[in-house]
Amino acid sequence: MKGGPARQGASFPPPRLPAPADTQAAPLVRLRPRLRPLMAPLALLGALFVGLFFRLGGIPLFDVDEGAFGEATREMLERGDYVSTWLNGQPRYDKPILIYWLQAASVQLLGLDEFALRLPSALAATAWIAAILAFARRFLGRDTGHAAAFIAASTAGLTVIGRGAIADALLNLFLALSMFDIYRYAVEPRPALRRRAFLWIGLGLLTKGPVALLVPGAASLLFFALRGRAADWWRALRDPVGWAILLAVSMPWYLLEYGRRGDAFLAGFFLRHNVERFLSPLQGHGGSLLYYLPAMLLLLLPYTGLFLRTLPGLRRMKATPLDSFLWCWFLFVLVFFSLAGTKLPHYLLYGATPLFVLMARRRRELRSTLLAFAPPLLFLALVAALPRLLERFAPGIRNPYMREALGRTEAFGTAWQLGVLALLAAALGLALWRGAALWRRLAAVGLLCSLALTGLLLPALAELQQGPVKEAALLARRGGWQVHGWRINMPSFSVYRGAVTPATASPRPGQVILTRSDALDALAAQGPFQLLYRKGGIVLARLPE
């Protein structure tokens, strides 16, 4: 019948209707759970690359420290002396031997350049971050472990130290490993854990000396005492096997060096670079008791706001054994080095590892957009304003060397300025965007700040301060000049020239002198000279016969 129901058995194809939205998105929905576990590891790998390996060999060595370590390593290879270190032909007692061995091995494998000299530190910093990941993941879960490692990898202080051809990244690795094993031992008192901590301390002693024993020993004592377990700490300390491991690792080099240098080694290394460093400012590096408070805010960029949000947790430091352990570690380092006569910002990094874990643990408690994003945005704004600030203030600096070094504009090309403005705009957009959790947006901004530091700021500073040093050294190398240093301390010059640059107390006729532009008046007072090179305050001059 017309208009009636279809006959039974009649077949009509169903209409082609659009698929429901959830059906269309099903493949993507299925894909997201598979990708989610990979996001944190991929973000961490990106932070490691940007913070530690991006342009690692693309900028000159910084003086004094990188230049001194680099030249001591070059002279080690030149002399074939793998026990004692020398700097410009003079004994160097500043640090133990391990970092020089690692740098020498890297140079032997890759050739003498900035990348080879910095690679051991970058690898040590990578291992340091991996140790943070393993520890935090074990005691606080996978997400917090990745967050702690990411914070560490993209923090300004660790980035700078981890890229430096110096001993501190390696020392921080051994401090972290020893302290983490001490806590594992506190939770599960197995002799193997205790003895492994002794091993790390021994390697730390071979890296930078007594501080590698002081920090784990004193900080762990505070922790055990706070938890009412001082007797357990004392029993662990008296482990003869542990001490045998520590001494077997560290003492052979100390005995060999003492056998060669005798009392000069004791006076130079132990008295001057350890005892005197604590009792009085060494090489002018002093400061007040509050020195490390502003230093801490800078070292922890771009997570300064997260640190301030974490700080009230100090009131709950006895809430759990882990809280007690982390706060005791940080507080000992802060108090001890605040009392020390010699103060340098990177000393605070010996106590930064527990802060990375604490900040990761409290990251979701940060809810203030202003507190989270003001520090990184201010940092990026200052980087963007750096060329204008130098143009404004450099001409008024009285010291000729500083005026010439900071008055060069070639380090800030158009690409540099467009790059920093793009990073600032992206960071501002992330701060204002509400489409993701605040912590995730802060982590993304942290990666942008790390890129600004390693890709823009450090290369520009290196060009301003060190570019002329390298250029002058290569010129002297091509000319085959025998150069003496006078009123200047730029050991990287010797690295690039491939030869020792002895210091002279008084320039002599016929010598080629490396000096600074603020010493030219004093040089002219000794007689006429021929200017061979002058740029950025770095001068090469020849005195006539």
Image: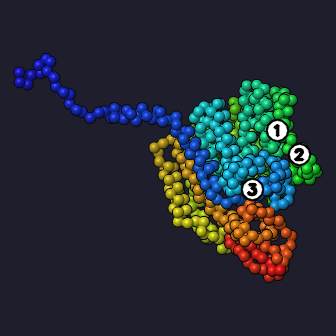
- Name the residue that disc number 1 marks: 249
- In the picture, residue 57 is in which quadrant? bottom right
Q: Earlier in the sequence, mark 3 or mark 2?
A: 3
Which residue occupies the foreground of this view, 304 or 21?
Answer: 21
Q: Earlier in the sequence, mark 2 or mark 1?
A: 1
> What amino acid does circle 3 point to?
Gly
Q: Which residue, given by chain and number where applicable, does mark 3 sit on? A: 70
Q: Which quarter of the image is occupied by the N terminus? A: top left
Mark 2 to mark 1: distance in Å?
13 Å
In the displayed orientation, state which residue is furthest to the right.
Answer: 263
- Of residues 400 and 434, which is closer to you in this image? 400
**In percent of the image, x 34 and y 35: which residue is there?**
24
Up the image or down, 428 lies above or below 404; here it is: above
Q: Earlier in the sequence, mark 3 or mark 1?
A: 3
Question: Looking at this view, is 261 or 9 the one in front?
Answer: 261
Q: Which amino acid lies under the numbered mark 2 shown in the image of this protein?
A: Leu
Residue closest to the eye, 281 or 182: 182
Identify residue for label 2. 256
Instruction: Tell me if 544 is positioned left or right of 349 in this view.
Output: right
Counting from the top left corner in percent of width and height, residue 184 is at 72, 30
Q: Is residue 296 visible?
A: no
Image quarter of residue 484: bottom right
Q: Quadrant of the C terminus?
A: bottom right
In the displayed structure, would residue 330 be above or below residue 507? above
Q: Position of residue 368 (x, y in %)?
A: 55, 45
